[in-house]
Amino acid sequence: MRELLRMEGITKTFPGVKALDNVNLTLNAGEVHALLGENGAGKSTLMKILNGVAGYKPDSGSIYIRGEKVSIDSINDAQKLGISIIFQEITMCPDCTVADNVFIGRQKSRFGFVDSNYVNEQTQKILDRLGLDSIHPNDVVRTMSVAQTQMVEICKALSYNADILVFDEPTAALAEKEIVKLFEIIHELKRQGKGIIYISHRMEELSQIADRVTVLRDGCTIGESFDFNSTSMDEIIRRMVGRTLENKFPQHTRTIGEKFFEVNNLKNNRCDIRHFDLRRGEIHGIAGLMGAGRTEMVRSIVGADPSESIEIILEGKPIHIRSPKQAMEHGVAYLTEDRKHEGLALNMDCEKNINMSSLKKISRRGFVNEHKARENAMEYVQKLGIKTPKLTQYARLLSGGNQQKMVIAKWLSHGAKVMIFDEPTRGIDVGAKYEIYKLMNELSDSGVGIIMISSELPELLGMSDRISLMHEGKIVGEVEALHTNQEEVLGYIAGIHSKD
């Protein structure tokens, strides 16, 4: 096979942290090379070095493109060398159209003006290639879902016609139909001789596309790259986390109490929900394809989006929620799927993020008691096992799993009774997922009722007690997780049949 890329002895140190230590990686034409590791293992840092991101120049090591040693000092350098990367953190201009985002900085001009017809036509060709009928070149990005925006990122990467493509968690926000289409595109790119570095925490999808694997742990390469098909999944996980995981989901027996939270007659511009309820100590899953209205439903419940009508009953009493602040006052917490932009203040430290919903608890006469603030934050750092060198560490510097724990800590500190988890393990590695699952079990044991939205059916089946099935804005049925399977759930949420 023809070698496209070789990274040798890459080392990168940030203040107080050695992010990469003598890391090696190669990529050949016509292959998918999976780059795996827990959050914080160094995968994204390595790819930012490859893409010439400012501040990510390696301290030592060499990069070779098609056998020639190169220096990648900027993103433009990377693009000229035929490197295109789709980062996990979406970097779109929200007030621009899909076409403008795909061809940003490369718009064709005519008589001194951007040729909108040209960029729209070229964008439409890529959308057609991906089979994305629900996205149009003139759509404004701000109006789109996280999953749709992720697909626009993929369109943008494909528009460069690069030989080296990096996909960083490309399926994290995609539905099954979109994932199948993406994999078809990846196989076609392989046939065209493109080399693909593929980063994912969804281990089960690797069997469909991966040829070789490199594992990073704590910034180091754990053995040289190896053939995927000749290595067991247990061995790959052992290399990633340094231990064997007996089960993907913790063994747990829940004690479920009485019904204490109900939602009736919820109507908004996407949903028409007659009834939904939650019991104490229960994990109630919500399954549905992208666009089914899952997120729109829970955003109306917490007052983040307006409703035409909604009736909410908590502990036998009607309550009125018109804003997330009112939801918080009633003990109803929403952990958004987009934790980086809506769940955390990334440029604030851990202490402030944990305490931001509990200011009354740590304040006196309108002033924050600094001692109480530190004490409260440290309590939840220890209770949830948040890995941070100090309370003053910026939230953006923590791994995805620890960021998610910090969002949970914020709401636990406030004393939530109902916790709504929207894609709780999106972008989180297999080891950190297990820790989040254990934490959810502990919350249910304490009497907290949990509503969980997930696009991963194994996750819903492995963690839920009941699962509500959504299709086109309606709950079309409900199943007991122990007495159903993926095929049955897919049948309902795809609209093949309904369950009264």
Image (spheres, rainbow, N blue to C red):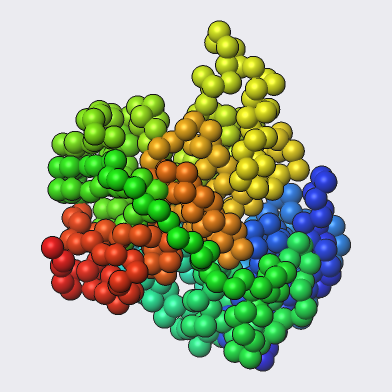
Of residue 494 and residue 459, the one placed in the foreground of this image is: 459
Compared across the picture, whether 417 is left or right of 11 comes to left
| Quarter of the view holding residue 63 | bottom right
Relative to 45, does residue 275 appear above or below in the rendering? above
Q: Residue at x 33, y 37 (%)?
A: 302
Compared across the picture, whether 168 is left or right of 110 comes to right
Compared across the picture, whether 36 is left or right of 72 comes to left
Of residue 27 and residue 432, the one placed in the foreground of this image is: 432
Rendered location of residue 263, percent (x, y): 22, 42
Q: Which residue is drawn at 35% across and 60% down?
A: 465
Quadrant of the frame with the C terminus: bottom left
| Quarter of the view holding residue 224 | bottom right
**One can see residue 417 in this view:** yes
Q: Which residue is drawn at 73% across and 66% down?
A: 217
Relative to 107, does residue 320 appear above or below in the rendering? above
Q: Which residue is drawn at 83% across and 63% down?
A: 21
Quadrant of the frame with the N terminus: bottom right
**One can see residue 344 in this view:** no
Residue situated furthest right in the rendering? 60
Rendered location of residue 116, percent (x, y): 35, 55
Of residue 236 and residue 113, the one placed in the foreground of this image is: 236
Rendered location of residue 190, percent (x, y): 53, 84
Tally of numbered tags: 0
Relative to 388, does residue 176 appear above or below in the rendering? below
Of residue 14 and residue 60, the one placed in the foreground of this image is: 14
Rendered location of residue 41, percent (x, y): 70, 61
Relative to 54, does residue 430 appear above or below in the rendering? below
